[in-house]
Image (cartoon, rainbow, N blue to C red):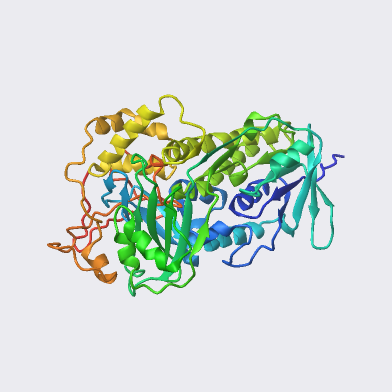
Amino acid sequence: MNQSSPPRHAVVIGGSLAGLLAAAVLAEHATVTVVDADPLPEGPAPRRGLPQARHTHLLWSGGARAIERILPGITADWTKAGAIRRSLPTDLVTKTAQGWIPRCGEKQFNISCSRDLLDSVVRARVTALAGVSTLQGRVRALEGTAARVTGVLVDTPQEEGRLLTADLVIDASGRGSRARTWLQALGVSGIRQAEVDSGLVYATRIFEAPAGAHEMGFPIINVQSDPRVPVPGQTATIVPIENGQWQATLSGTRGGQPTGDPGAFIPFAKAVRDPIVGELLEGRKPLTDVAVTQGTANRRVYFEKAELPDGFFAAGDSVATFNPLYGQGMTVAAQGLLAVRTLLRAKGLAHPGIGREAQRAIAPQVSTAWELATSQDILYPGATGMKPRTGTGLLNGYVNRLMTGATTDEALTAALFKVLTMSTAPTHWLRPSVVWHVLRASDRGALKAPPLTAAERAVAGLDPVPGATPGADATPGAGTSTGTGTAADAAVTGPAADPGGPADPLGQARCAGGASGSCPGP
């Protein structure tokens, strides 16, 4: 008579997005306990362990597709809860370092809502999975040896030093992870860490949107900095979110940071490279105080290069944190955990060395985002950290030319967004079809003003653009932040082989045609 093997158990440290997605992936192979220091809210409410949730968060289409594969139907759940699916660049007005991006037919998309709402929908789905449970407690240490992790010691409100045994432990505790300290206590040494810090500070305030703005699908507005100019980089962004609100985020690198002074918020927004964000916020009713966050350095821990004990790996912000302007963190976490799911389905949780292999599976997504973000951040005055690799200047020159072309050539707009949304690797920009367009790139005919439609300007209470006719200015731009920057300028995106782009399976493509309803051709 065959005796069934005992059920396997996994522990996930951290109940934020990366931890929840890790639990969903592991639930196919084991019972899962998600341990978080704070009680996990039942709805879209703040979590003390995620103070940056107060700022704008945009989930790129590359990340949304990855989460959709892990949790089928999640995009519909988000939109049902109040999130807004945004076509890119149709629903974006952005000024990149090179200029305004025209608003044309959908190339990619993002999910716009508060971070609290986004996490709450995922949390409800994951905690309802069979075999997934949550535990409030603070992890004190890893249990095991330098050869194998066998569990965690947790201090709960009821008990100190509670032992949770596990076949696999995943650290998804975020930017404040103590994983290196825990591993050192087991005798694991030599875990290297790198950092690039532009001194970025960002400040956010929520405003009441103008009447009718949400109903008409008012676009995301974003003015980015130009890292090529040796001055502090400053940005301003408005993201329409649930409940008829505008979430406005300002940012500034060392020497040009915003403050928590409510009276300085709109003047700062008006003083960036274009005053449109400040103009749109003027006269709007603020619904919150100004939330300010510092400590936004890019930081990477090279777990994949260390001799990790079996039965352990790290994910999400525990592995790498990025300048939030580029909006990479959630997508990198989701894509990495999707790669882990593929690995586990192929080899199983009991496979020797599965933790180390999972750590290596996550590394490519982290490396791509890291190179894109740090190559830009190190250019700002006063930035500290590792210097760009040899040849980075040449590559940046090529990318700058590509982004210049994206202001006038729809094929390059598409190529920009395909990488920006992390829907494909930056090597896409080196495809012959893209190179051909880059060699012919020009800003001749580029937009000189924010490409808002006449209807959008009217609902926002702005004076019409002099000489504008309905629909004539209906080609606004793309690029956002916290996702509010580009990674070429930070990460960049869009299909080049098919500039028109088919509708994404997760939503319907449409045009930003104003009254005319027309899209510019390739």
Say above or below: 325 vs 206: above
Report if residue 383 is visible in the image: yes
Say how many tags the image has: 0
**Residue 236 spot, x, y in % from top left:** 38, 56
**Residue 234 spot, x, y in % from top left:** 39, 51
Outermost residue on the top side: it is 390
Towards the viewer: 26 or 162:
162
- Give residue 443's quadrant in the image: top left
Outermost residue on the right side: it is 1
**Residue 80 spot, x, y in % from top left:** 48, 66
Quarter holding the N terminus is: top right
The residue at the point 79 percent across, 62 percent down is 157
**Residue 106 spot, x, y in % from top left:** 32, 51
The residue at the point 53 percent across, 45 percent down is 297
Report the side of 462 relative to 387 (left or right): left
Outermost residue on the left side: it is 467
Towards the viewer: 455 or 273:
273
Report if residue 506 is visible in the image: no
- Give residue 362's quadrant in the image: top right
Quarter holding the C terminus is: top left
The residue at the point 43 percent across, 72 percent down is 286
Towards the viewer: 148 or 457:
457
